[in-house]
Image: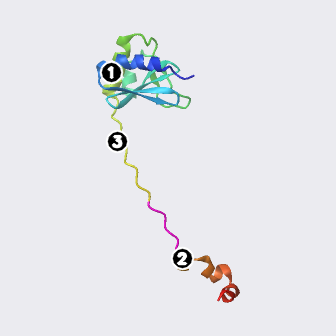
Amino acid sequence: MASDAEMASYIADMLNSLGEVRIKRMFGEYCFYVNEKPVGFLCDNEVLVKTNAEMRALHPEMPQKLLFDGAVNPMWLIDNPDDREAVERYFGIAAKMLPTPKPKKPRALKEPQKTRKYRDGEGSPLNDPAVMGDDMRENSD
């Protein structure tokens, strides 16, 4: 079930006090970025905050949930997304404690494809006796 855009905007408005907030739609769900750092998700209208082991050890009382089956790191689940204080607090912890993502490398330009040298006959299979046979080449002269 996809999340509501209105809900994503509502959560993003709560996060404005943390810095520059951006929402990115991903696979029908939403990712929240604070100062260009991905800090949480809205999945099935549930608010999830990214965590690491240190954050989970500091706040073991927070309910946790995996983003998807097979995920390695659990995320904090904010039970009441209307609780502005909790949303700001836990997203703020994530914004401070999560590492900054590595900058993406620019895409390498593809090398142009090698052109065939068939125009002057060089490299042409028609000039290769192994391909055409010796008798075929003699007939073409």
Q: Is residue 6 magenta?
A: no
User: Of the residues under marks 2 and 1, which one precedes in the sequence?
Assistant: 1
The main secondary structure of the magenta stretch is loop
Q: Residues within 10 Å of mark 2 (few under 14, many from 20)?
A: few
On screen, 46 above or below 128? above
x and y percent of residue 35 in the render? 31, 29
Residue visible at 40% across and 53% down in the picture: 108
- The reply to whether callout 3 and callout 2 are in contact (CB within 8 Å) is no
Which quarter of the picture shows residue 36? top left
x and y percent of residue 131 in the render? 66, 78
The residue type indicated by label 1 comes to Gly
x and y percent of residue 54 in the render? 36, 26
With 121 as the anchor, is 137 left or right in this view? right
Between 5 and 90, which is closer to the camera in this rendering? 5
Q: Which residue is mark 3?
A: 103
Between 112 and 88, which is closer to the camera in this rendering? 112
Q: Which mark is residue 135?
A: none
Q: Which mark is residue 119?
A: 2
Q: Residues within 10 Å of mark 3 (few under 14, many from 20)?
A: few
Q: Secondary structure at mark 2?
A: loop
Q: Which residues are magenta?
A: 111-118
x and y percent of residue 66 in the render? 51, 25
